[in-house]
Image (cartoon, rainbow, N blue to C red):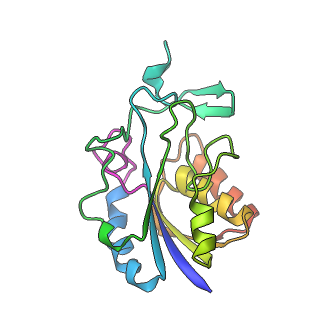
Amino acid sequence: MTHALIVIDVQNDFLPGGALGVPQGDAVLKGINALMPDFDAVVLTQDWHPAGHSSFASSHEDKTPYELISMPYGPQVLWPDHCIQGSIGAQFHPDLQTDRADLIIRKGFNPDIDSYSAFFENDHSTPTGLEGYLRTRGIERLTMVGLALDFCVNFSAVDAAKLGFEVDVREDLCRAIDLDGSLAKAREGMRTAGVTLT
């Protein structure tokens, strides 16, 4: 069984000091790098938003970051502007060993829909292409690490499990935002989907 490491959104804007910094997000870097040689494949995901993306609070009059609104595809948290295409904030952290990556999946580039999951945009039907890549490589098992545990890691892990992959999430190599109880909800949802949390 071929085993891939999926490294979720270890980008400057998600690290402390970034536009949407995850507390202690930089603490995962050393451990993630150390894991990479143990896997048959390494995939990095990268949030890649155009300026004025619909998930940004600044794109909605009288809205502030972390408010929840309704979009055509369902509920959407409004975020500070982050990971704008070509910006320093969208770049991977310089200490992340990107040369080891077999594939980089960019997500969230459609201006009208957000994309937490590495597999689908937030409409839960528009694919990123990652599933097809993994299938053609014969990969059946995934280990997920990165940022943030309760959003992009969570959505990626649940989608992967629903697609039939064997999935484990290394909580020690993830950090969470924990927005209004989102971490506990994410853990419950991942376990229900059949994801192993280690």
Q: Which part of the image, by quadrant, shows the C terminus?
A: bottom right
Magenta stretch holds residue 17: yes
Q: Which part of the image, by quadrant, shows the N terminus?
A: bottom right
x and y percentages locating residue 120 in the rendered image: 62, 50
Give the side of residue 100 with respect to residue 169, left or right. Answer: left
What residue appears at the point 31 percent right and 55 percent down from the top-left corner? Answer: 92
Nearest the eye: 90 or 57: 90
Based on the displayed image, in which of its 4 quarters is residue 81 positioned? top left
Nearest the eye: 48 or 66: 48
x and y percentages locating residue 57 in the rendered image: 47, 25
Magenta stretch holds residue 42: no
x and y percentages locating residue 181 in the rendered image: 60, 45
Residue stretch rendered in magenta on the structure: 9-23
What residue appears at the point 62 percent right and 64 percent down from the top-left corner? Answer: 132
> In the rendered image, is residue 97 in sight?
no
> In the rendered image, is residue 136 in sight?
yes
Q: Is residue 52 depicted above or below 90 in this figure?
A: above
What residue appears at the point 72 percent right and 64 percent down from the top-left corner? Answer: 163
x and y percentages locating residue 122 in the rendered image: 63, 42
